[in-house]
Image (cartoon, helix red, strand yellow):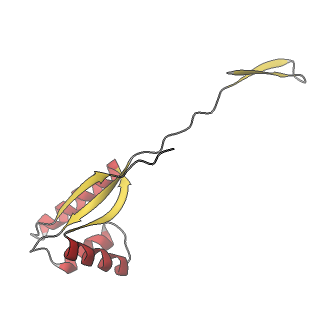
Amino acid sequence: MADRFDNDAGTITEVKPQKKLKRPRLFRVLLHNDDYTTREFVVHVLHTVFHLGEQAAIRIMLHVHHNGVGVAGVFTREVAESKIQRVERLAQEHEFPLRLTMEPEEEEDE
């Protein structure tokens, strides 16, 4: 800590060095393709749960359909877990086996 003397007030103040805040780790929420969940339901989930526009939702759905897996979004751990639980509940209610997982984003070197 550095001391600083204030000539006008006749006092010494301590200046604490600023701590650099670390950003929370982010996680990718992954949608996995299956042979039973309809494309319309996947678009609906991407639109309502992940708040994507229709064109973005269709693009991600097609990517998942053709590649087997795709990223629905990137969030903090708690938000990612919450969205996965919400989608799994919706899928179960509609009798679809839609599966989602999450994986950590690569951390950037500072």
Q: In the displayed structure, does residue 36 sit left or right of residue 108?
A: left
Q: In the displayed structure, would residue 74 be above or below residue 3?
A: below
Q: In the displayed structure, does residue 17 sit left or right of residue 91?
A: right
Q: In the displayed structure, would residue 108 be above or below residue 58?
A: above
Q: Position of residue 45 (x, y in %)?
A: 26, 71
Nearer to us in this view, 58 or 87: 58
For image coordinates 49% across by 40% down, the residue present is: 22
Q: Position of residue 59 (x, y in %)?
A: 32, 78
Q: Residue furthest right?
A: 8
Q: In the displayed structure, does residue 22 sit left or right of residue 5?
A: left
Nearer to us in this view, 4 or 11: 4
Q: In the displayed structure, would residue 63 be above or below residue 91?
A: below
Query: Which quarter shows the N terminus?
Result: top right
Q: In the displayed structure, would residue 96 be above or below residue 23?
A: below
Give the number of marks: 0
Q: Position of residue 63 (x, y in %)?
A: 26, 75
For image coordinates 11% across by 69% down, the residue present is: 96
For image coordinates 33% across by 48% down, the residue present is: 77
Q: Position of residue 57 (x, y in %)?
A: 32, 76
- Res 65 → quadrant: bottom left
For image coordinates 24% across by 58% down, the residue present is: 84
